[in-house]
Image (tube, rainbow, N blue to C red):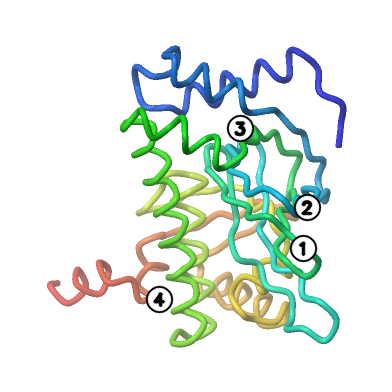
């Protein structure tokens, strides 16, 4: 981990304040939260050191990361549980060997809070508590959706849904064409969807041949029709819209 300069810490804390509900960025609640938090930089590929004693809440000020299960000897294959991007609130429970790890996909700037102390302060400010709860519920919904896909959806549907989700989160796009860069590898994508890297590559090739996907370099993807991908993914709203036409 890189040493933390005063200016770096100030920038991280200001990013955290800016993400709080309107009117609370300069409020006493924000000041108290910043007092118990600290800033941390993770270089690409670096894992957050485990803490066996304390649960932590983290605000991802910039960059991208993955939360991955690290199996012990003889355990199940590696599983990527979630991808996180700037603005996300991440819960990392106290850890031991073979537990979960937060790993930087790109250089990351984090604001780290002891979970208990954060919640003790936030419970006195309903707007802040509601904001954290909303972000946590969104992350939980994404995880549950992915778990359901792994048991019921085809490989094509899983990849299509992944691309739609990334379009929404990285480009704020839910229809039409869009382009964005994926910070994760194809192996990471496969580990998050329960697919082999070969299957991921094959499905991306099929989407490319269908004219729905183009790639530029190692990470840039261009989607020609996000709605069409949502239909392949079997998203409920797209199925309903299709049946009405």
Callout 1–callout 2 Cβ contact below 8 Å:
yes
For image coordinates 58% across by 78% down, the residue present is 206
Report which residue position mark 3 lands on.
Answer: 61
Q: Examine the image and state in which quarter residue 215 appears.
A: bottom right
Give me the C-alpha separation between circle 1 and circle 3.
Answer: 26 Å
* Above or below, comparing residue 183 to residue 147 in the picture: above
Which badge, 3 or 4, comes first in the chain's sequence? Answer: 3
Give me the C-alpha separation between circle 3 and circle 4.
Answer: 33 Å
Q: Return the x and y of residue 83 as percentages of the image width and height.
A: 60, 56
Give me the C-alpha separation between circle 1 and circle 4.
Answer: 40 Å
Report which residue position mark 1 lands on.
Answer: 96
Report which residue position mark 4 lands on.
Answer: 232
* Secondary structure state at the residue bearing disc 4: helix
Which badge, 3 or 2, comes first in the chain's sequence? Answer: 2
Which badge, 1 or 4, comes first in the chain's sequence? Answer: 1
For image coordinates 65% across by 18% down, the residue present is 11
For image coordinates 67% across by 56% down, the residue present is 66
């Amino acid at each position: 981990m890189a040493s933390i300069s005063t200016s770096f810490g100030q920038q991280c804390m200001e990013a955290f304040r800016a993400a709080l509900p309107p009117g609370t960025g300069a409020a006493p609640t924000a000041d108290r939260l910043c007092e118990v938090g600290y800033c941390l930089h993770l270089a690409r590929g670096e894992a957050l050191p485990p803490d066996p004693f304390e649960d932590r809440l983290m605000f991802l000020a910039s960059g991208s990361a993955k939360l991955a299960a690290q199996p012990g000897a003889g355990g199940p294959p590696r599983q990527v549980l979630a991808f996180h991007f700037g603005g996300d609130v991440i819960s990392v429970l106290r850890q031991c060997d073979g537990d979960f790890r937060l790993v930087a996909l790109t250089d990351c700037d984090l604001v780290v809070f002891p979970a208990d102390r954060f919640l003790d302060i936030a419970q006195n400010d309903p707007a802040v508590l509601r904001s954290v709860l909303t972000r946590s519920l969104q992350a939980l919904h994404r995880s549950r959706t992915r778990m359901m896909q792994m048991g019921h959806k085809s490989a094509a549907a899983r990849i299509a849904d992944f691309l739609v989700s990334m379009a929404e989160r990285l480009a704020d796009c839910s229809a039409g064409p869009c382009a964005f860069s994926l910070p994760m590898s194809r192996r990471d994508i496969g580990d998050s969807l329960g697919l082999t890297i070969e299957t991921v590559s094959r499905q991306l090739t099929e989407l490319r041949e269908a004219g729905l996907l183009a790639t530029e370099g190692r990470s840039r993807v261009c989607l020609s029709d996000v709605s069409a991908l949502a239909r392949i993914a079997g998203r409920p709203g797209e199925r309903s819209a299709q049946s009405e036409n």
